[in-house]
Amino acid sequence: MSTPQAQGLAAGRTEAVRFARFVVVGGIGFAVDAGVLTALLHATALGPYLARVVSFGAAVVCTYLLNRNWTFASRQRRGDRLFLSYLATQIVGALINYCVYAAVVYVTRLPPPTGPLIALTAGSALALIWNYASLRWFVFGGRR
């Protein structure tokens, strides 16, 4: 027989594993974002602000696929509707992330790629909590 305490411990472990996976996926997304950002800064005249918009788009698609199939393993909703829900929550996270990014680029005035990469790190760190909570409870089905 399973006690309520044992069930609570199991649920806590499950949540810890899910959060660890989310952090791994976030790291992969960060690498995609940073790689695309750096490539665009070197290969184009987009500048750090517009290049970041493009690099964020690449990271969102990457993290969506990984979060859907590994972190949250959603079997309830698939396809366009799930992606639109994911994108809607990520837009808020992106606003948090981008505002911090733009402020750090502006304040530090460090040249590319150093300044934009430092700014990307700061923005990503601050958006992490919103992103996890919104995906966990709003997009991928709440409590199971």
Image (cartoon, grey):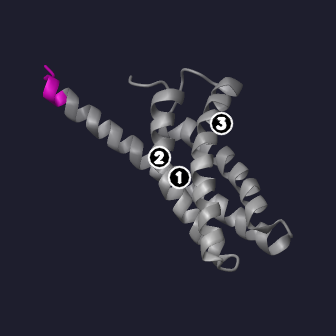
Report how far apart the C-alphas of labels 1 and 3 lie in the structure: 15 Å
Q: Bounds of the magenta span?
A: 1-6
User: Of the residues under marks 1 and 3, which one precedes in the sequence?
Assistant: 1
The residue tagged 3 is 87
Q: Is residue 5 magenta?
A: yes
Residues at marks 1 and 2 touching, judged by CB atoms closer than 8 Å: yes
The residue tagged 1 is 26
Q: Amino acid at mark 1?
A: Gly
**What number is the disc on residue 69?**
none
Q: Residue furthest right?
A: 45
Q: Residue furthest bottom?
A: 111
Image quarter hosting the C terminus: top left
Badge 3 density bin: few <14, some 14–19, many ≥20, Cα 10 Å: some
Q: Nearer the viewer, residue 78 or 117?
A: 117
Residue 52, image quadrant: bottom right
Q: Closer to the camera: disc 1 or disc 3?
A: 3
